Image (cartoon, rainbow, N blue to C red):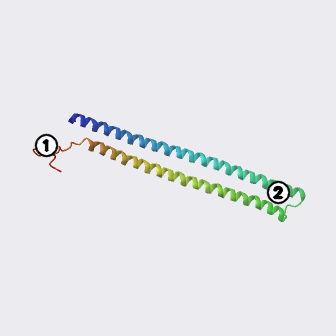
């Protein structure tokens, strides 16, 4: 193989490796952006659900109070228990919602770390591929033969 061909092949391998690494970086960035957008969407949806739960609890509390006022049972333990139950359910639901949001954040962080690790892996894979390509173009030492045309090495 001529020196020009070897240099041309190494140049093509270098450009292809660099292009592959750039594309891998862009793909990882796009995946990170998609994960962030999905996480933001989930947070907005969770916030809306929490608002709806608070609204429903306020309505339930108001209905209990109105019903108790209409029957003259405003200061009874039954009314207090009903209101307490509504508020307890609300706290439980909100706590669950916030915990799920926290788990979503943790999952998004871990996905980001996984994408970064994959990107680093791709980088080192590209370097390895380039090195292998370069090694395949290295000149080889011709075998040494004795005077009879047989291999002297072995």
Q: To which residue does mark 1 refer?
A: 149
The quarter of the displayed image where residue 14 is located: top left
Q: Nearer the viewer, residue 147 or 78?
A: 147
Question: Which marked residue is nearer to the observer: mark 2 or mark 1?
Answer: 1
- Within 10 Å of the Cα at label 1, are there few (<14), some (14-19), or many (20+) other Cα atoms? few
- Give how far apart the Cα atoms at labels 2 and 1 are: 109 Å
Mark closer to the chain start, 2 or 1: 2
Sort mark 2 into few (<14), some (14-19) or many (20+) by Cα contacts within 10 Å: some
Please state which of residues 101 and 154 is positioned toward the viewer in this rendering.
154
Residue in the image at 78% along x and 60% along y: 83
Q: Could you say which disc has been placed on residue 65 in the image?
A: 2
- Mark 2 falls on what kind of element? helix
Q: Residue furthest left?
A: 147
Answer with left or right where residue 12 lies relative to residue 102: left
Residue at image coords 78%, 52%:
59
Q: Residue lying farthest bottom? A: 77
The x and y percentages for residue 92 are 69, 59
Give me the residue at 34% from left, 44% from top: 129
Residue 6, position in %: x, y?
24, 37
Determine whether the residue tagged by mark 1 lies in a helix, strand or loop: loop
Residue sitting at x 32%, y 43%: 130
């Amino acid at each position: 193989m001529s020196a020009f061909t070897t240099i041309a092949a190494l140049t093509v391998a270098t450009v292809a490796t660099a292009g592959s690494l750039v594309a891998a970086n862009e793909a990882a960035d796009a995946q990170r952006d998609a994960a962030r957008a999905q996480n933001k969407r989930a947070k907005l949806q969770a916030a809306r659900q929490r608002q709806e739960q608070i609204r429903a609890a306020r309505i339930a509390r108001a209905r209990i109070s109105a019903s108790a006022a209409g029957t003259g049972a405003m200061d009874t333990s039954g009314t207090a228990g009903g209101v307490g139950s509504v508020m307890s359910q609300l706290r439980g639901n909100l706590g669950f919602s916030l915990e799920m949001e926290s788990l979503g954040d943790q999952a998004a962080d871990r996905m980001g770390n996984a994408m970064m690790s994959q990107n680093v892996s791709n980088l080192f894979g590209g370097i390895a591929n380039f090195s292998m390509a370069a090694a395949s173009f290295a000149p080889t030492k011709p075998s040494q033969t004795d005077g009879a045309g047989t291999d002297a090495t072995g």
